Image (tube, helix red, strand yellow):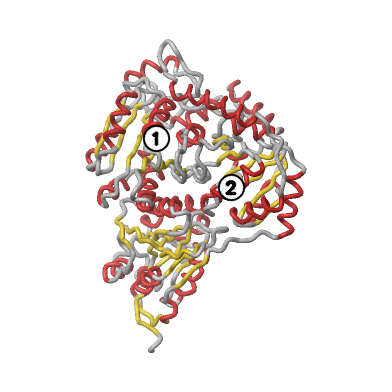
Amino acid sequence: MENTIRLTTAQALVKFLNNQYIEFDGKITPFVKGIFTIFGHGNVTGMGQALEEDPGDLEVYQGRNEQGMAHAATAFAKQKHRKQIMACTSSVGPGAANMITAAGTATANNIPVLLLPGDVFATRQPDPVLQQIEQTHNLSISTNDAFRPVSKYWDRINRPEQLMLAMINAMRVLTNPADTGAVTICLPQDVQGEAWDFPHRFLEKKFHRIERRQPSKEAVDDAVKLIRTKKKPLLILGGGVRYSEAANSFIDFAETFHIPFGETQAGKSAVRSNHPLNLGGIGVTGNSAANRLAKEADLIIGVGTRFTDFTTGSKQLFAQADILTINISEFHASKLDAVKVVADAKVGLEAIGKALESYQSSYENEISDAKKEWEMELERLYTVTYSDSFKPEIEGHLDDELPEYKEILRTELTQTSVLGKVNRLLDDDAIIVGASGSLPGDLQRMWISKSENTYHMEYGYSCMGYEIAGAFGAKLAEPEREVYAMVGDGSFLMLHTELITSLQENKKINIILFDNAGFGCINNLQMENGAGSFGTEFRFRNQLTGKLDGQIMEMDFAQVAKGYGAKTYSVHTLKEIREAIEDSKKQSVSTLIDVKVLPKTMTKGYESWWHVGVAEVSKKDSIKQAFKDKQESIRKSRAY
């Protein structure tokens, strides 16, 4: 047929991906930059053949772990403000299952990523095939069905011609800023190699226009009416401001009406930290300035935020205030029983701003006073030391364990002082990437963003293992910038193998590893709620007691990365951290700085509360008290 071309399913898919384009504010860019691969049983002879024979303009990257490569793809799209993506192809079974965590991470953060896991035979003839799970109650189930709850769109291609409708729907979701996330297209290995006469129109260039959704007049009127009745509104700068590229409109709105703002993890660095109205991080991992004014505000204006429990302080932080939302997603805009403006962040702010006319908040010195007080506390955190003669009031005291930690880690460094030193040493346009443990809290509170879009935090899923893969993805998105993964020892042990991919691709990333010999953040959580230290420190099993309370394990992470070919540094003093960072800037290969820090030397909550499950029945008085305190805090929070 003249209007068709005979291709395998995999070949047609590759050609289709090459011809997808994004149009945003009049700018057109290719939508799919490339594809991460780990070839194996179920995709090497299908997708592998298609990519080898004719990848088109797709850049093909060899991953080391399926979860890691999918995290890298997510980070790439996040740093590109969701205007460009990477795809990922995996083998059948365990290769596919490895990507499920990454799919959940992308979907929780509303970041588009296309996952193409291999699947069992559609014909079911070689059955059970290698790596196939057999469910006796339903033979149509495979490992890939586990992607359903963590995907925004899921489909399985059992015949070549099904590819067309599936990919049209996949692009619909991937290019929809209101409801995007992981898209999973399952590809049975036999179908990947089967041919069909695909219409040329399916394979022609397709332009997906991301339109700025306009607010309704009625919604704007409702917002204006509400704001005019309030004296002390507070803006929350969410990730939607970054993805909408609405920072200038946000600043104009804040300055015109003299409204201060706090930043979420996803929104931080859309506006520089030194802006006079920028109070900094807000919520459970926020600072005293933002949280104090949030408690005093009579209106919270959330712009592009999902209102997670960390942002709202488990619905307690602004329980006294009315809520106004500006969000492109009706689902997120409707949270907290808000007055909602369903719109793109930029045009929503501009429409409300135009209608507000001469409105002014009644703030006088409260903003500058709160910022000055926090700046004093920040300087203390930057310079605080931990020694036998002086113990800082941070998370807690090491007491009897201090000599042991000092001996094993050979350090007196606090986590906050290291972060302060690093913040001052990195270039203004350097990107930092983080995700889990105590570091996101310290970073949201303490990190001073000196340039726009330099703070890259995955905290919707708080996924351990995202950091290093995410740094590689961010580097692919912005290769001209230095990129630093801020990672704890526990998260490094979870997943770090995309460091090897960065070396293979000559895409330099820098890893700053904070080694405190355990899952420090969770150790804090259990002990703050009345429990003892149990299963969260990295200790040998005690041969006398049979418990994990033996000697602290000593690990040399620098040697691990050195074996891969990275330039590494071992750091025990602030002088050594300065020397390591300055030297790392001169390197052309990826680097790892292994920093030994004492546990319990991170920041603590500032006027915020986090709702976690606490045992209602216990033999320990400390846990009974923690449960009582939790119930009291619940009574102070919003009931919905």
Question: Which residue is located at x 61 percent, y 32 percent?
Answer: 291
- Residue 146 visible in the displayed image: no
Please name whichever residue, 424 or 460, is drawn nearer the observer in this view of the structure: 424
In the drawing, does residue 587 fall left or right of residue 284? Answer: left
Circle on res. 250: 2
Q: Alpha-carbon neighbours of circle 1 within 10 Å: few (<14), some, or many (≥20)?
A: many
> What residue is pinned by disc 1?
488
Residue 477 image position (x, y, % from top left): 38, 53
Residue 382 placement: quadrant: top left
Please name whichever residue, 173 or 533, is drawn nearer the observer in this view of the structure: 173
Secondary structure at badge 2 equals: helix
Identify residue type, mark 2.
Phe
Which comes before the other along the chain, label 2 or label 1? 2
What is the CA distance from the residue labelled 2 to the residue labelled 1?
33 Å
Quadrant that contains the N terminus: bottom left
Identify residue type, mark 1.
Gly
